Amino acid sequence: MPNYKKVSNNIQQLIISGAGDKKIKWLNIANPGKDELSFLRKIKIYDFDFKQLRASSAKIMAQRPMLEQRDKYFFLILQFPVFKGGEVVPAEVDFFISHGLLVTLHVNDLPVLSEFFNTAKKDDLTLLAKKMPSSAILLYELLSKLIFHCYDLMDKNSSKIDEIEKIIFSNQQKKAASSILELRRNIIAIRRIMQNHKNILKKITQTKSKVISSAKLNHYYFELIDHTKRIWELSENQKEAVEALYDTNQSMLNYNINNVMKTLTIFSVVMYPLSVIASLFGMNAESGMPFINTPNSFWIIFAIMGFCASILLLIFAKKKWL
């Protein structure tokens, strides 16, 4: 069993023991504040940069991922997409990586991270870091869980695409329009969040440091790079699919609108001459007006109007405008 300790309400400590005397300490810090930063600053051996600590506790999310190297550790900021209220939003995780130490700081909005920590807390025998005790290996395992979670989001988007396609062809264009806009927003959000992961991971593999040895780790981190590329390609395919659905939905909306306009136009054209006839026979001209004193004059005029309307409809039918 791994050595677990709850330092405070927001700080959990897990020590993973490997072969020999090698150990990895994982400090998982949720909702970091002044107390949590003071706790990290007391670990003098690593000499954590105060600006980086402040950035990790800031309520404002970082605008971009970053990787900074110090003499005794690395500081890494990454964002991952999560669903919140039906919308994809970025969730930030800040990492401090050093010899035998991994510190993760977050606002507890990544269930995958918490699940991985709890699994390691209960049983660390399944961890690769147990066999290869290295904080960089533990970081790789955590990143792989977070990145693989993106596939679940992509699967949800694929299901949504199929659902929208059925909605479109069931003539529910208004409902489809809002669903398309929502899906497009989520796909763009995933692409924006994940676009720099590949570059950050490449920087890790290119770093020459005792903290992260390149020879053994390159294989694992290049695997993560391949997954980020695949996620980007899948999101590109989904983006194109959504654009196609949007064009299809717009075409069907325009088709329906054109049908409505055609119906209204035909109705207007048919009614216009009838209105002219009704206006003519409605004039107060006592002499010269036909059918004034004729028996059944109303029905005669009505028959004339019906005849004109029928002629117009026959013309429209012959022109194939109906």
Image: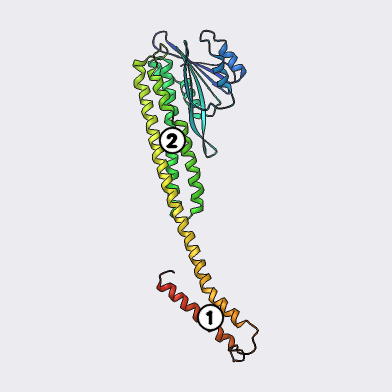
Position of residue 33 measured from the top left corner of the image (x, y, whole percent): 60, 20
Q: Residue at x 40, y 16 (%)?
A: 207
Q: Amino acid at mark 1?
A: Met
Quadrant hosting residue 231: top left
Q: Quadrant of the C terminus?
A: bottom left
Q: Are marks 2 and 1 in contact (CB under 8 Å)?
A: no
Q: How many marks?
A: 2
Q: Residue at x 38, y 19 (%)?
A: 205
Position of residue 280 measured from the top left corner of the image (x, y, whole percent): 59, 81
Q: Which residue is mark 1?
A: 305
Near mark 2 (Cα within 10 A), the count class, few <14, some 14-19 or many ≥20, is: few
Q: Taking 85 as reference, is 33 above or below it?
A: above
Q: Residue at x 37, y 33 (%)?
A: 230
Q: Amino acid at mark 2?
A: Asp
Q: Taking 172 as reference, is 51 above or below it?
A: above
Position of residue 312 measured from the top left corner of the image (x, y, whole percent): 47, 76
Mark whose residue sits in front, 2 or 1: 1
Q: Taking 295 as reference, is 181 above or below it?
A: above
- In this view of the protein, can residue 125 be seen by the observer? no
Near mark 1 (Cα within 10 A), the count class, few <14, some 14-19 or many ≥20, is: many
- In this view of the protein, can residue 138 be seen by the observer? yes
Q: Which residue is mark 2?
A: 152
Position of residue 16 measured from the top left corner of the image (x, y, whole percent): 45, 15
